[in-house]
Amino acid sequence: MFGVCLSQRSLRLSLKMRVWVIFLLCLAGKALAAPTEEEPVVEETEVGANPVQVETGEFDEAIEVEEELVTETENPCLNHHCKKGKVCEVDDSNTPMCVCQDPSTCPSSVGEFEHVCGTDNKTYDSSCHFFATKCTLEGTKKGRKLHLDYIGPCKYIAPCVDSELNEFPLRMRDWLKNVLVTLYERDEDHNLLTEKQKLRVKKIYENEKRLHAGDHSLDLLAHDFEKNYNMYIFPVHWQFGQLDQHPIDGYLSHTELAPLRAPLIPMEHCTTRFFEQCDADNDKYIALEEWADCFGIKEQDVDKDLVI
């Protein structure tokens, strides 16, 4: 995860590139397993947390029931999938069904790094405790408003002002481009990118005009985007495709944004406001066209085929 504030008064994206690359290695190497219910983007809260490294599994709302040494006919739950916060049980007819997990059955956290903050500004012992609690509130107004806000214990986060919000896409674009370049450099034995993705990133990697990762001024980032615009088109599409998994429908819900948003918020207080701004039609979902527009990609360059 990268920990930055995209303004001049805070840390830069490039200073946390190493941690964020680890996060993207995980994200690129895993497909979020099963479809989950779509959830709306929620309003920003003035809370935050200390930056920690998380695995994408923390946000995967589809989990597999642990295998037992029994046959499928003896245990119908063996291959029955339940979303995060639920566990499989069988009814009187031996039919598997998903029921809310009792939060008290979640393993105790071993450290503060496992704590998560909900949008109710409450610190939960772990993501297991959070999702189990959210499940028990299904169908209620409180349950609909409760989402995983970020990783770590709840903490005050300063509000994002307009000038800082304007800086966010400048550094985010540059970060996305450099993350892809780093994945390309490390991809020889890990299959982190598909062959089609490698070909597109190779063109960026070998371009002599590429602005290398570093602590660059806002003016330089803006100038580079203007002069080397084509280098940024694929990274923006690629990130959308990495997040669009619940389900793959061309829209990003609050749940799908979680792998990127939740670890970022404690370190970049404009994150929530930026993603809310991307939802131009206020329908609680971010379409590819809205996502691209947020990063300055021209309408004629939006291409669903690039979301591999």
Image (cartoon, rainbow, N blue to C red):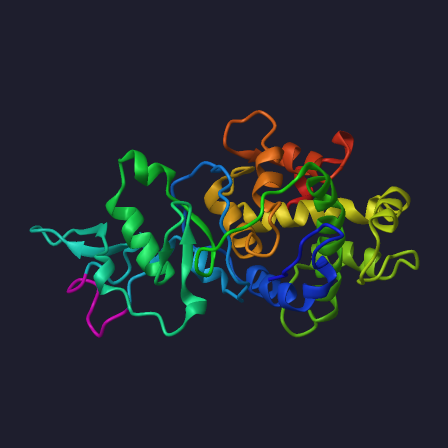
How far from the left and from the top, in percent, is residue 184?
Answer: 73, 65
Horizontal side, residue 222 vs residue 17: left or right: right
Identify the residue at horizontal 56%, vertical 60% (top origin).
27
Residue nearest the viewer, comparing 12 with 213:
12
Horizontal side, residue 228 vs residue 96: left or right: right
Identify the residue at horizontal 54%, vertical 50% (top origin).
157
Residue 124 seen in this snapshot: yes
How far from the left and from the top, in percent, is residue 91?
Answer: 11, 51
Identify the residue at horizontal 26%, vertical 43% (top origin).
137
How far from the left and from the top, in percent, is residue 30?
Answer: 52, 61
Horizontal side, residue 53 vs residue 71: left or right: right
Q: Which residues are magenta?
A: 67-75
The image shows a total of numbered marks equal to 0
Residue nearest the viewer, comparing 14 with 44:
44
The image quarter containing residue 183 is: bottom right
How far from the left and from the top, in percent, is residue 290?
Answer: 64, 33
Report the predominant secondary structure element of the magenta stretch.
loop
Q: Residue furthest left?
A: 92
Identify the residue at horizontal 67%, vertical 69% (top origin).
18
